[in-house]
Image (cartoon, helix red, strand yellow):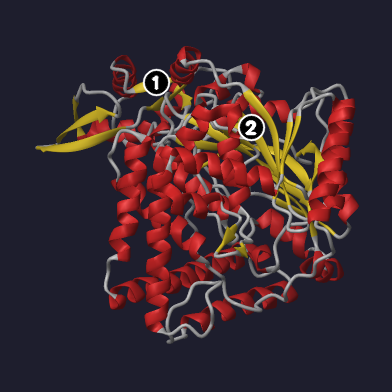
Amino acid sequence: MEFSFDLDVTPKPKFDPNATMFATLPGQVADLGNGECIFRPRHEDLPHVMTHQVLSALDRCREFRSADEHVEAIRQMMPGAPLDGIRRVFNGLVERGLIIAAEDFAARYIDAAAAAPARADTGGLYIRACDRPAQLQRLLESLHRHEQGGFAAQALTVVDDSRSPESAAAQARLLREHGERSGAPVRHVDAAAWQRVQDSLLSALPQHRAALDDLIGRHRDGVPRTGPGRGWNLALLLGAGRRILFGDDDFVLPLKLHPELQDGVELDAREMTTVRFYTETEAALRAGHDADFDLLQWHLDLCGAPIGHVFDHDSRLVPTREQWRHIAPSRLTRLVPEARVVATMNGHRGHSGSVSSDWMYLLDPTSSRDLYQDRNRYLRLIEAGKVWMGPDRATTMISTPFTPFAQDLSRLPAFVAPDERGEDGTFGAISRILDPHAWVLHLPTAVGHLRDSEHRFLAPGSGAIARNFNYFLVDFLARCEDDLFAGTPQARLAAAASRLDDLAAATDRDLLRMLGDYLQATCSGHIQRLQSVAEAAGPNAPVYWTADLQAVIKANAKAMLYDGPPRLAGWPADLDASACARRLRGELSRFAAMMRAWPDIWQAAHSLGDRLA
């Protein structure tokens, strides 16, 4: 019997770990035929003619690596090419500016940030409150402790949507007492003040009566409205022209840094966040690191900043050398020097805010293992688990899965859907409509989140993924983004509104088919993500977790077999096909009207300034 071994005994090259790193600039390619093409760097007009072989070399240099590493990668791709020839090609691409050093890449953004106008003044902290004096008291006490730690007191505005006069009076007293303790300005926007704001804007913009009522009106046809977005929209108007902090009355300070905090920032926008689980609320609230600087001010300092500020050491986010190795400029299509951080986000620690445990089966492998590592603990977690939810390193994002904490209102900001849950996502979607280079920066911080009562999750697989109109809207607007070419935020918003009107003008049959396809695709995509989580966990994942994950899959598969009128979550179950079409058409038209009116409403609020309330 003969054996044949093919061993690669070629010595592996050693690379200088401190050498300058280089990467290919993003660009577009057009074929010229005969083995040649044109490469045109993005945002530059000068074309570069090259062979396909040189283009292949350029393609091998996407991520930042040292020159020697790039040359070695090209040599492996072209084993017959002489090494000195490869070096000449690489150096030539550097000289032509098609491959750039990391320091020069960062300098473009730092220079743009230095040349940017001064950022707007800060407007303090805005809190949504509604009939929960005990919650507000706990938040104010935690804010006072934060200030006693030597950090600056924030001006405080409570946007009070309470229906009970007693609750509103109690919250006004709590706010007044906090102002006396802190010495900072406080403002209580109760029902009467809220109505005065609406009346002032209506007086200036009588043509937008319906949109104003939709965006911030507390009643419709004499009936109180319960959606959470109205208070947020009111804060966007009261804070117009400033940078503000924003939160809810069930939040608790201090902010904490992630338990496994990592340096730097992820520039390749990720939508995944890590989760650490706890069986006790207090353990989740204690988790994380205290900072020796003011984390509230950190959020404000980054909010409204040009994206290049992250390369400045003052940001505390400068990418590490290891992170540079994962940065590929050609994949960062939104990372342009003029890009701006329109908002920052916190994670949550304590209560997750969810009614179901199904989201627990969509996590990264490390988070999943933390969930299922012990069966008894797992059973407690899926019933009423507590969390530390958020990235371990600052991360750029284009979506807003949580309510943004710091919001830049110096320019026309996004508004949010006034009704139903899921309003967080509409902020990110409309921000991208207004500015295709808008970024949200999710910092590795978490705010305490305590609900007013203990909540138990629904069992895994109790129902399919639910999508109300707000989620439908976010997904639809995402499809429109790349087709908008208008140069101003107002024009882009109007163009997106036209897309909604176009859909609303469809026949009942086409409208229902589109909605049915959307719901089918949503369940299908959810199933695929669940299956990818199961595959990542591998065959050694515990049976009890796998069974529950399969129950979630089955619930969504069952929903795909439904053949009745397509309905969004929150719609009455007895709507027939015609009524479903009317409902969707009405909601699309109403939101399009809000999109058209919002720039005028926000500008009027900006002009009125402190006279608004």
**Near-viewer residue (268 or 222):** 222
Callout 2 crowding tier (Cα within 10 Å): few <14, some 14–19, many ≥20: many
Q: Which mark, residue 578?
A: none
Callout 1 crowding tier (Cα within 10 Å): few <14, some 14–19, many ≥20: many
Image quadrant assignment for residue 147 = top right
Q: Residue at x 31, y 32 (%)?
A: 57
- Indicate whether 325 appears above or below 374: above
The residue wearing badge 1 is 100
Quarter of the picture containing the C terminus is top right
Q: Is 424 on the left-hand or right-hand side of 29? A: right
Q: Mark 1 vs mark 2: give the one in front.
A: 2
- Indicate whether 330 appears above or below 120: below
Mark 2 element type? strand
Rendering coords of residue 69 (x, y %): 46, 27
Mark 1 element type? strand
Q: Residue at x 59, y 43 (%)?
A: 234
**Near-viewer residue (10 or 444):** 444
Residue 29 visible in rendering: yes
Q: Is 30 on the left-hand or right-hand side of 182? A: left
Q: Amino acid at mark 1?
A: Ile
**Near-viewer residue (482 or 49):** 482
Rendering coords of residue 149 (x, y %): 88, 25
Q: Is 308 on the left-hand or right-hand side of 403? A: left
Residue 414 visible in rendering: no
Q: Residue furthest left?
A: 34
Total of numbered circles in the picture?
A: 2
Q: Residue at x 80, y 66 (%)?
A: 455
Rendering coords of residue 206 (x, y %): 42, 45
Rendering coords of residue 549 (x, y %): 65, 73
The residue wearing badge 2 is 244
**Near-viewer residue (571 or 101):** 571
CA separation in Å, label 1 and label 2: 37 Å
